[in-house]
Image: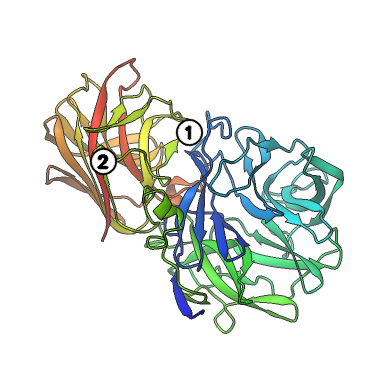
Amino acid sequence: MSSNIYADNPIMPGFYPDPSICAVGEDYYLCNSTFAYFPGLSLMHSKDLVHWEQIGNVLDRDSQLPLEGADHSAGLFAPTIRYNNGTFYVICTNVTHGGNFIVTAENPEGPWSEPHYLNEADGIDPSLFFDDDGKCYYIGTHPNPDGGPKYNGDWYIYIAELDLENWCFKGEKKDVWNGALKNCIWPEGPHIYKENGYYYIMHAEGGTGPEHAIMICRSKDIFGPYTGNPKNPILTHRHLGNDYPVKYVGHGDIVKTPNGEWFMTMLAVRPLNRYTTMGRETFLAKFIWEEDWPVVNPGTGMLTDKVEINLPEWDPEKDPDSYTCRSGHKTSIPGRDKEYVFSSMKELGDEFLFLRNASSDMYELTSDGLKLHAGKNNIKEVASPSYISIRQQHHHFTATASLDASSLKDGECAGLVLMQNNLYNLRAEITDGNCSMILCQDGKDEVIGQTAAGTSVSISVVVDGLSAKILCDGKELGEASVATLSTEVAGGFVGCTVGIYASSCGKDSDSYVTFKNLSYKAG
């Protein structure tokens, strides 16, 4: 039996941007962008759209995801996940290496194939559509084909039939839409749907910031001509003022439940005092069809804190058939507190993120803890530092790590980082017998506070909104604003992560640090 349950927005808190969703029977799969983080494209599963578990990452091998030299907000842009005739497809853009590509799997838990690169597909934000006649279509966005962009963001949405056996276009691609508003910027993230006798293109425009919005158009023929909804945008928060608590709403994808209800996922942010530190998060809304157009949250017209859903409640921690239970709870539930005791772990959960392509010997799980090699690269380089992280998922949290740094040599360092990018971060750093609180802004380090420290210490990053403290063995080193660790100051498309690291600071070294545990507690 079905009963009404409620999803809390955001359904995926923290750095989970550009959501794409698909339904297979009673199962729902959600995929998100990851940019320069590895593994790439987090993959979530749910049976009720309320409770989610991470079942893996689509790209978990270096051969699938080259990220060398990728800026924090380069690498993997917006993915789309789709299912057709027993096969899962994820299409995405690696803007740093290779461009647009498709990977496939029979089981969403993997393994996923090597990338099939689409050499003819320029631009970004690709999506797939499988029509009733068995044909597959590619839709994406690229610069104005008529002599190039006339202004920044002057892009067009185009469609081409796709040959999935030879991974190439069939026939020519056709430009079909350049946005709902005159001279709009960045028509992007397009998806095709077929309902009510129409082909619909739902897309975002206005840029993934304050002017972001979800638009829709339709046609009787897949190649158009397309007519915009006279009520566009169908969802935006750009008219609600600079201080509205949820902003940047856009980049939608839709799904239908077995009960006939329609839902839309989209990204949005929750800034504090106009600063966004957690990046773009995944939200959910209900919509209905009126006059063959979608109406999102009718009577409200904006995102709500809770979303009513008529599905049986499901708990991945109690369902013996869930990935969570079958994997022995190796991966934590998104949004929950986390307590990692490394000495008792055989492998890291799927929620852990590295920067770019980490070396295979970067770390080892031992009976003493996580042995992290002091890599040559430091945290401020566009490289692959010895950094192991999880997403910040709350405005108020404490992250704590206990470590033994007795192996470090003079000038080498280790610690705990709140990372926006390589140029904007906050570090609790152990080096040369001291523990320092270091705020990095635009690549420039400022030592906020310092204390003498032994080689075995417990360090904490305590974040209270836009204020942060560093503790070393319970001693407070100082307090600083982390407003600069925000999208509005640091730029880019990512949210903050928090993690452990070790660096030999440019030298060849056999040093390592043993981390006993890492905890993350909200509040």
Q: Between residue 514 and residue 85, name the one nearer to us.
A: 85
**Which numbered tag is attached to residue 356?**
1
Q: Is residue 48 left or right of residue 353?
A: right
Above or below for 457 versus 210: above
The structure residue drawn at horizontal position 68% and vertical position 40%, both measured from the top left corner, is: 100
Q: Residue furthest bottom?
A: 299
In the image, residue 357 lies at what x, y percent? 48, 30
In the image, residue 403 lies at what x, y percent? 20, 35
Q: Which residue type does callout 1 highlight?
A: Arg
Residue wearing tag 2: 344
**Which numbered tag is attached to residue 248?**
none
Q: Between residue 47 and residue 49, name the one nearer to us.
A: 47
Looking at the image, can residue 484 be seen?
A: no
Q: Is residue 460 left or right of residue 288?
A: left
Q: Spatial distance from mark 1 to mark 2, Cα to Cα?
A: 27 Å
Dot 1 falls on a residue whose secondary structure is: loop
In the image, residue 355 lies at what x, y percent? 44, 35
Position of the C terminus, as image quadrant, is bottom left
Dot 1 and dot 2 residues touching (CB under 8 Å): no
Q: Earlier in the sequence, mark 1 or mark 2?
A: 2
Q: Between residue 73 and residue 161, name the one nearer to us.
A: 161
Q: Residue furthest top?
A: 508
In the image, residue 468 lies at what x, y percent? 25, 51
* Front label number (1 vs 2): 2
Q: Is residue 486 left or right of residue 406?
A: right
The structure residue drawn at horizontal position 51% and vertical position 57%, both measured from the top left corner, is: 45
Above or below for 268 versus 126: below
Dot 2 falls on a residue whose secondary structure is: helix
